């Protein structure tokens, strides 16, 4: 699925290490064969992209996952495209949410449709967990 440029401007990016650590420490996590997704609510004083009206996300792939920089960058490129597709569908209404995507080795060779499916599945499960969490 092609993603329009105006849809991409609604999605912000997490860039600071402190944002990644905050989501990892205070959020919820769901694991699939290709990705690990962590989500947390965006605090008001967050340094995330202020122009984005939708969710903010960040990608990471560790050296433990893939030794070579070429392989890590390939996984990140594929996940970036998959996130764009996943967040413009049923999850486009995720407002004030930070998402951290941790790539796994299977993401390098998995079909693109499987990547998008895994991301949507993880987000759906995490949203269900957030809904049942007492406020």
Image (tube, rainbow, N blue to C red):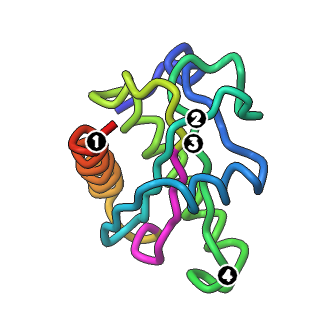
Residue for point 51% across, 46% down: 99
Which mark identifies residue 46?
A: none
Of the residues tagged 3 and 1, which is closer to the observer?
A: 1
Chain-order first, disc 4 or disc 3: 3
- The label nearer to you, 4 versus 3, is 3
Q: 10 Å neighbourhood of mark 2: few (<14), some, or many (≥20)?
A: some
* Residue at 34 percent of width and 62 percent of height: 30
In this rendering, would 118 be left or right of 10? left
Q: The magenta stretch spans which residues?
A: 99-107
| Local secondary structure at mark 3 | strand
Badge 2 vs badge 1, beta-carbon distance below 8 Å: no
- In the rendered structure, the answer to whether residue 126 lies left or right of residue 87 reads left
Residue 50 locus on image (x, y percent):
71, 20
Q: Secondary structure at mark 1?
A: loop
Element class at badge 2: loop
Precedes in sequence: disc 3 or disc 2: 2
Q: Which tag is nearer the camera, tag 2 or tag 1?
A: 1
Give the residue at mark 1: 134
Residue 91 on image: x %, y %: 33, 31
- On residue 63, the disc is 4
Categorize mark 3 by other alpha carbons within 10 Å: few (<14), some (14-19), many (20+): many
Residue under pointer 2: 42
Mark pair 4, 3: CA separation? 20 Å
């Amino acid at each position: 699925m092609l993603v329009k440029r105006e849809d991409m401007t609604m999605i912000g990016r997490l860039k600071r290490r402190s944002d990644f650590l905050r989501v990892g420490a205070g959020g919820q996590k769901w694991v699939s064969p290709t990705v690990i997704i962590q989500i947390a609510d965006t605090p008001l004083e967050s340094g995330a992209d202020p122009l984005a009206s939708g969710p903010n996300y960040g990608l990471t792939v560790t050296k433990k996952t893939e030794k070579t920089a070429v392989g890590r960058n390939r996984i990140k490129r594929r996940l970036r495209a998959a996130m764009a597709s996943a967040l413009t569908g049923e999850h486009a209404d995720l407002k004030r949410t930070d998402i951290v995507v941790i790539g796994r080795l299977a993401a390098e060779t998995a079909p693109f449709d499987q990547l998008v499916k895994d991301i949507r599945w993880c987000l759906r499960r995490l949203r269900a967990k957030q809904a049942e969490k007492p406020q």
